[in-house]
């Protein structure tokens, strides 16, 4: 599958908000958005009329880039969210939150979702005692996610655990840091997602 491999800070500047794609760097003065708080490119400082379509598109792009999924995969999540009971926008965000790479990041075993995705692909995590190397795997309530015993000395995992308090653990997850383990206590609710997202704009875009 094709994936963006360019500068990650460029994506934050394009969306005008920190997407925390580079882990701890995003919390420091080295963050590109802090130094250049405008869109990339020679016309980045120019004022642009924000049409309804532009607002909807930018919101979709922001969420895609935040969770690290491509267009076709994102569309499948939306279609699945539409088939579920409840608000489509909330269902969409819940599906994205339940991705294994996101849960690994939320539990503090990685400094960013892209780092979590790589660690999962390399087989460093177990779900209910079985190795799962698919970042898009959707976890369920009562699932136990833990670091493979042989992987617990990996520097990036240990470093991420040292600064997990900066982000905090969402209420729908429970962390047992001493045993490199986490449990999905419940499905994430809309209030658990504190990142500024207007999911209704995405629903409006795909409903045209």
Image: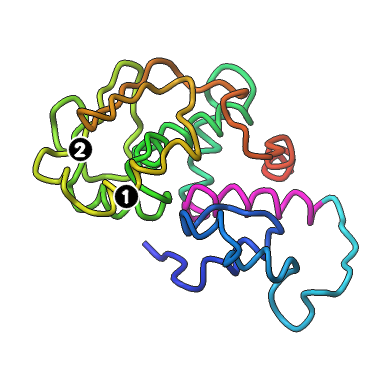
Position in image of residue 97 (x %, y %) = 47, 34
Q: Magenta stretch: residue 192 in it? A: no
Asked if 36 appears above or below 125 in the picture, the reply is below
Position in image of residue 87 (x %, y %) = 64, 22
Q: Which residues are magenta?
A: 53-72
From the image, state whether disc 1 or disc 2 is nearer to you.
1
Q: Residue furthest left?
A: 150
Residue drawn at (15%, 38%), measured in percent from left and top? 131
Residue drawn at (17%, 47%), measured in percent from left and top? 123
Crowd rating for badge 2 (residues with CA inside 10 Å; few <14, some 14–19, many 20+): many
Residue picked out by circle 1: 159
* Quarter of the image that includes the C terminus: top right
* Quarter of the image that includes the N terminus: bottom left
* Res. 163 image quadrant: top left
Residue picked out by circle 2: 147
Residue drawn at (56%, 27%), measured in percent from left and top? 91
Tell me which secondary structure the magenta stretch mostly adopts: helix
Q: Is residue 28 left or right of residue 151?
A: right
User: Is the C-beta separation of discs 1 and 2 under 8 Å?
Assistant: no
């Amino acid at each position: 599958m094709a994936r963006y491999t360019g500068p990650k800070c460029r994506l934050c500047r394009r969306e005008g908000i920190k997407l925390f794609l580079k882990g701890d760097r995003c919390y420091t003065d080295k963050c590109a958005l802090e130094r250049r708080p405008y869109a990339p490119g020679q016309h980045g400082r120019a004022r642009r009329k924000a049409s309804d379509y532009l607002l909807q598109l930018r919101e979709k792009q922001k969420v895609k880039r935040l969770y690290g999924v491509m267009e076709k995969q994102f569309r499948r999540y939306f279609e699945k969210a539409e088939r579920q009971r409840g608000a489509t926008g909330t269902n969409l965000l819940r599906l994205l939150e339940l991705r294994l790479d996101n849960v690994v990041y939320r539990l503090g075993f990685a400094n960013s979702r892209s780092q979590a995705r790589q660690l999962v692909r390399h087989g460093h995590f177990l779900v209910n005692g079985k190795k799962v190397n698919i970042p898009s795997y959707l976890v369920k309530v009562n699932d136990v996610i833990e670091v493979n015993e042989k992987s617990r000395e990996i520097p990036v995992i240990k470093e991420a655990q040292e600064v997990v308090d900066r982000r905090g653990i969402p209420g729908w997850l429970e962390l047992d840091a001493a045993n490199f383990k986490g449990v999905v206590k419940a499905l994430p609710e809309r209030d658990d997602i504190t990142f500024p997202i207007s999911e209704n704009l995405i629903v409006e875009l795909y409903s045209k």
